[in-house]
Image (cartoon, grey):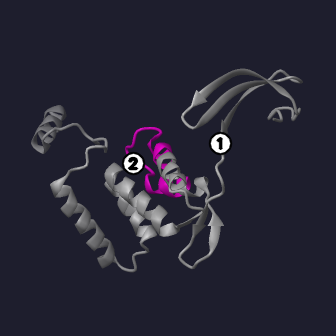
Amino acid sequence: MNCPYCGYNDSKVIDSRDIDDGVRRRRQCLSCGSRFTTYERLQPASLFVVKKDNRREEFNREKLLSGIRKACEKRPLPTGTVDKLVDDIEAELYQLGKLEIASDIIGDMVMARLKKLDQIAYIRFASVYRDFTDISALMQEVDTLVGSEASAPATSQLPLLPDIKAGELVSSRRRRRR
C-alpha cells in the first residue's frame, strides 16, 4: 500500500477492525509517519451485466450507486440508506451464483427497494429506467403507485413536517403576525 501523502511503498498496520463486508485498517507510513485508513473487501468472481442490446459489461457498483443517488437526491432519507441499499442489491446479485445477469433484473431489484424506501425516488428512477415516452405513461405509473399506497402506506420515509393539522399550522401563523 503506497502512502497517499508521500508515495512511499511501505506502511505498518496500527489497528484492524472487521466491518460489514470487509476489514478496516488504520495504517502509518514508515517514511513520513502520516496515518491513513484503508478498507479491504473480498472481491468475488467477476459479474457481467447483459444490456438490452445484448452488450456485456462488467458489473460496476459505483455506476449503480450513482444512479440510485441521483434518484434519491434531496430526499429526506437517513444517512447511509443508499449505500445499504446498494450493498443489499450487490450481495443478492452475487448470491444468485450466475456470471451474467440481465440489466432488467438489476433494475427491477432497484425499483422494488426504492418503492418501499421513497416514492419520489422510485418515480425518478422509473422515469429513467422505464424510459417513459410521454407524460401519460408516467401518469399511469404514478396512479399505480398511489393505488398501492392506499392499501399500504410507506412508513420508512421520514416526515417533512410533524403531524399537525393544516388548520393549526395556519392559525399559529396568524397569531405570530399580530
User: Which label is found at residue 27?
Assistant: none
Quarter of the rendering containing residue 79: top left
Residue 22 position, x and y percent, is 61, 35
Residue lying farthest front? Answer: 97
Residue 137 horizontal side relative to residue 32, left or right: left
Q: Which mark is residue 75?
A: 2
Crowd class of label 1 (few under 14; some 14 to 19; many from 20; radius 10 Å): few
Magenta-drawn stretch contains 127:
no
Identify whether 128 is placed above or below 112: below
The residue type indicated by label 2 comes to Arg
80 in the magenta segment = yes
Is residue 66 rendered to the left or right of residue 127? right
Magenta-colored span:
65-86
Q: Are marks 2 and 1 in contact (CB under 8 Å)?
A: no
Residue 45 horizontal/vertical position (percent) = 66, 54
Dot 1 lies on which element? Answer: loop
Which is in the foreground here, disc 2 or disc 1? 1
Q: Nearer the viewer, residue 124 or 41?
A: 41
Residue type of the residue flagged with mark 1: Leu
Residue drawn 64% across and 49% down?
44
- Within the image, what quadrant is residue 172 found in? top left
Q: Which mark is residue 42?
A: 1
